[in-house]
Amino acid sequence: MPLFVQLLGLCFLACLLMGAILAYLGIHVLKREVIFIDIAVAQVAAVGSIAAHLAFDAEQDSLLAYTTSLLCVLLISAFYAAARTAVMQVSIEAVIGISYAITAAAAMFLIGMHPGHVHAEEMLAGSLLWVTWRHIIASAAVFSTVGILLYLFRKPISQVSQDYDRAMAAGLKVMRWDFLFYALLGAVITLAVRISGVVSVFAFLIIPATASALFARGWAARLLIAWAMAAVASVAGLLFAYHFDFSLGPAIALFLGIILTVAAISAKLRRIPSVPLSR
């Protein structure tokens, strides 16, 4: 078996799992216009992880740290769901940005209390190279559960994503479905950021969904395009990182950006009408 397969096989499997669930969530995120939700949620989860370390001496990768992070994510999910209904004067994206700034300041304060905590660097770049079967199994369990719940409640969640005001006017309990969506998104991001870092998670969430919107409108077609793009970028990024000794997460994000650029140019060229040559 080639050496790079031995080193990066589990990394690629982790990327496929993250790409599959984040691509679907990304389509919803774009429709809801909450582009920076994953950075804000990741920062909230980081505050929970640091607090667990300071209060209980919990290791970064422990169940206690993850549980504390998830509880913080559930609280912020409830806040986002309530804020979108109660604070109509301010966009939800502005609320997300403000919450990110506050939690980032809280994280810096907590890190200052314990300078040895290495959360900041790991949150950005992740530890994809050191992924194990334990991470794969945990990811598969969490992402599959989230995927099943998203499928079971796809109609009301999609209604809210498509048109929030119309869903509210139709009598849908929008706050309830908003909370469920943000909570499921938070559960995925909390785990994915620990594995791959916020840079690649943000790229997996937004870039394939954006590229798919250039070529398709239906959910199924967009999802297939997003999945294919995530898989190709994962292979290219991992091989690039292997040959040039580059960080895995940022390398994958780089190739996702390259593929999006090529896709945007291709979509633009397809829309330019051909002009017949004069004789």
Image (tube, grey):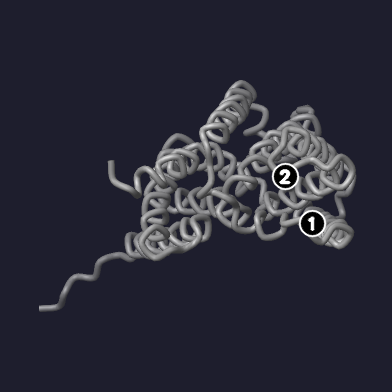
Residue displayed at 67% across by 54% down: 123
Along the line of sight, the residue nearer the viewer: 94 or 170: 94
Identity, as a three-letter code, of the amino acid under mark 2: Gln
Q: Quadrant of residue 244?
A: bottom left
- Say which of marks 2 and 1 sits in front: 2
Along the line of sight, the residue nearer the viewer: 126 or 169: 126
Q: Is residue 168 visible?
A: no
Residue displayed at 48% across by 50% down: 208
Residue for badge 1: 100
Name the mark on residue 60: 2
Callout 2 crowding tier (Cα within 10 Å): few <14, some 14–19, many ≥20: some
The image shows residue 46 at horizontal and vertical percentages of 76, 49
The image shows residue 60 at horizontal and vertical percentages of 72, 44
Looking at the rendered structure, the secondary structure element under dot 2 is loop
> CA–CA distance between discs 2 and 1?
21 Å
Residue displayed at 56% across by 42% down: 22
Looking at the image, is 206 positioned above or below residue 65? below
